[in-house]
């Protein structure tokens, strides 16, 4: 038994949950926040038999695609001491999924 921890962007989470459940995977959904963009994301916990890990990863890959998004960055104007700041647009890559696959020593349903 393995535990897959999948961190995905919020806009992918509903479609991914539906597709994982259609393929028979049990999923627990946690609302989380990313550190870089401080944007909402979703962390999914999946208990998966070893022989079904590749199938679960393929389902996640089929839904969670990387894409470009504009965000604003902040910089100081005229030196650090005056406290004036300006924002400017920056293109960043978002989406995709971050996966952790962990070995489960014991699985119990009580």
Image (cartoon, grey):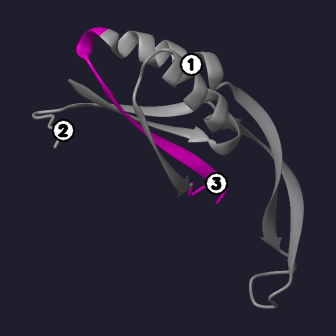
User: Which is more N-terminal, label 2 or label 3?
Assistant: 3
Residue 64 lies, in percent from the top left, at: 63, 26
Q: How far apart are marks 1 and 3 (CA)?
A: 19 Å
Q: Residue at x 88, y 72 (%)?
A: 86
Number of the label disc, if any, that sits on residue 61: 1
Note whether residue 60 is visible. no
Q: What stretch is highlighted in magenta?
A: 34-51
Q: Residue 73 carries which label?
A: none
Q: In which quarter of the image is the C terminus?
A: top left
Magenta residue check for 43: yes
- Secondary element under disc 1, as helix, strand or loop, is helix
Q: What element carries label 3?
A: strand
SS assignment at label 2: loop
Dividing the picture into quarters, in which one does residue 18 lie? top right
Among numbered discs 1 and 3, the one appearing first in the sequence: 3
Residue 99 locus on image (x, y percent) = 43, 32
- Left or right side of 109 for 27: right
For mark 1, does the 10 Å Cα neighbourhood hold few (<14), some (14 to 19), or many (20 or more) residues?
A: some
Report the residue marked by disc 2: 109
Tell me the residue at 56%/19% (across/down).
61
Confirm or deny contact between disc 2 and disc 1 (CB under 8 A): no
Query: Residue at 65% across / 44% down in the picture?
Result: 10
Q: Farthest residue toward the left? A: 105
Q: Name the residue under label 3.
A: 40
**Quadrant location of the N terminus in the rendered image:** top left
Question: How far is the residue under mark 2 from the one under mark 1?
Answer: 29 Å
Which numbered disc flags the more N-terminal residue, 2 or 1?
Answer: 1
| Nearer the camera: disc 2 or disc 1 | 2
């Amino acid at each position: 038994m393995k535990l897959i921890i999948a961190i995905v962007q919020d806009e992918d989470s509903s479609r991914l949950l539906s597709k994982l459940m259609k393929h028979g995977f049990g999923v627990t959904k946690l609302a989380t926040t990313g550190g870089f963009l401080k944007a909402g994301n979703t962390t999914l916990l999946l208990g998966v038999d070893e022989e079904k890990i590749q199938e679960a990863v393929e389902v996640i890959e089929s839904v969670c695609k990387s894409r470009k998004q504009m965000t604003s960055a902040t910089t100081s104007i005229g030196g650090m001491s005056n406290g004036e700041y300006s924002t400017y647009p920056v293109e960043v890559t978002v989406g995709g999924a971050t996966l952790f696959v962990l070995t489960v020593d014991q699985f119990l349903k009580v």
